[in-house]
Image (cartoon, helix red, strand yellow):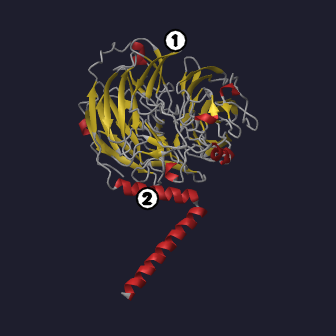
Amino acid sequence: MRRLVIAALVAAALVVAGAAGAVALFRAYPVRMSLFAAMTRNYLRSLSAPKGATTTELNPAYKGAAPPSPSSAAASGADEDWPSYNRTLTSERYAPVAEINASTVGKLKVLCTYDTKQYTSFESGLIMVEGALIGTTIADIFSIDPATCAENWRTHEDFPPSILSAMRGAAYLDGMLFRGSQDGRVLAYDFKTGKRIWQTTIGDVRRSEFVPGAPIAWNGLVFIGNAGGDAKGGKGHMFALDAKTGKIVWQFFLVPQTEGDHPFGPQGASPLDTSTWINAPGIPISGGASWTSTTLDPATGELYVPVGNPGPAYVIGVRQGDNLFTGSIVVLDAKTGAYKRHFKLVHRDWHDWDVASAPSVIQTAGGKKLLATAPKDGYLYGVDLAENTVIYRAPVTKMENADVPFSVDASVRFCPGATGGSEWNGPAYDPQTNLILTGETEWCTTVKLQTNQQLRDVPTGGLWMGMATRNPFQILGQQEGSWGGWVYAVDADSGVWKWRLRSNYPVVGGVTPTAGGLVFFGDVGGNFYAVDAATGKKLWGRKIGGAIGGGVIAYKAGGGEKIAVTTGLTGPTWPTESVTGKIAVLGLDDAPAKQ
């Protein structure tokens, strides 16, 4: 008995010592320990993760569409590379390759993989240009062979760790590559060697501003914005930089400039002032982050900028008004940065429903020039660009309690949640079917508010959602235990869905239609699918790795069509399988798979 008592005391002492050690480590390295804890939680959850499953439903009310017009089919182009984040500057994501189709997709296999050997929030939108496949992690940029996955080069940068980290890809122009950074810079590299050429600062790290979005490049300019709008005092801006030198050509404030704001370069003409922000004392204008890529119409020289939520995200009472330009698509003159117009989509946002993904500019089968965009609010919007009016607002995921106000006294559950709806990959367009395709998350959030005094007490640069919690895993609110995802196929002219597919995991990666009559997409369970573009019928599917949260691209390389997919999205926000980030290249080649 005495031995049992001694053993129990020793065990208790070890537990206390271990707990004390964990507390000490957390205080010394809070970000690293939080990330480690998140990885451990994700690993334990993944042990009971179910297999991927999908169901497809056809809409009996769908009336059919006009056949594609010649102009809409031609808009996709004949180039077999994937040279920009959404392939074209107008962001249709349609790939004119047809070797993999309904007759051949059964032979699809993983031909090779590239392992980044990093546990990371792997969300890279891949590009394939000039015979090289380019990807990014939080810290690295690399070039690999698009058919064999052999590494050409890899360049590492040292950035401080962060709980909210993301890196969504690179842009290419005239022998150079461009990417953002965790410490508020834009970096340029030589395409062939990976040697860094220049760096330019566009974010204020004191306000936790950083640059996760994938840039686009056109006519000697690189277009990119900064995020950090979920931090107190953090503001979103849009920039154009000279591609050769990195010099800032123009800057545009996406929320009003106020005292203490530091412009980094010449400002584009703007009508924005503080009249739509009626803020309480001690509540600075914050938000309007630029989280991902943008869209450019070369025919008009107009840049379409998606703008994130206002801050503090959940507490609307301290920031009355329309809070422009948050929750909007802002249209700028690409050469000068001058304001042209905007479309306010998410009104009076208190759900963290950013307009966070690049819109698509398309020519529909019915002859409309349409702006298609899918924010996190769970709707697909169609904007007639000839009339500058929203012609439909189609629901594309589960919605509950969207109008219920939040409170400091009680918790409120709402859907889509803070990570719901469409995340950082926007809609795609298939000119063969006239369908807009959007991947969606079905995942609800429960929120209880901080008091106004607690909001004022948050330091500048501190996370500023307004969620009352001590749990580091609930910084965006308490996420529901169950989740799922959707792919909706919506008629571009009418806004009526033709088919919809439900996955038992969220769909946040790119959705890619091809000339082979297929749509490719993956989910955060690591499952990858090919479905019939006209009906949504699953034709092929298997688990190919960790969570799919980045690029799904189609191109020609090594003598045939290839599909490249990023896998291994992991981190505190997404409770997914804890694996290293990898790129899988799929095709019809009969050669043995390579690692």
Q: Secondary structure at mark 2?
A: helix
Disc 1 target residue? 386
Q: Nearer the viewer, residue 82 or 396?
A: 396
Is 516 placed above or below 17 here? above
Asked if residue 7 shows in the view, the reply is yes
Q: Amino acid at mark 1?
A: Ala
In percent of width and height, residue 465 lies at: 57, 42
Residue, disc 2: 40
Q: Are marks 1 and 2 in contact (CB under 8 Å)?
A: no
595 left or right of 540 in image: right
**What residue do we see at 59% from left, 62% from top?**
27
Q: Tag 2: residue type?
A: Thr
* Picture quadrant where residue 69 is located: top left
Using the image as rendered, state which of residue 496 and residue 370 is in the foreground: 496
Viewport quadrant of the N terminus:
bottom left
* Residue nearest the viewer, comparing 155 with 65: 65
Q: Is residue 200 above or below residue 222?
A: below
The secondary element bearing badge 1 is classed as loop
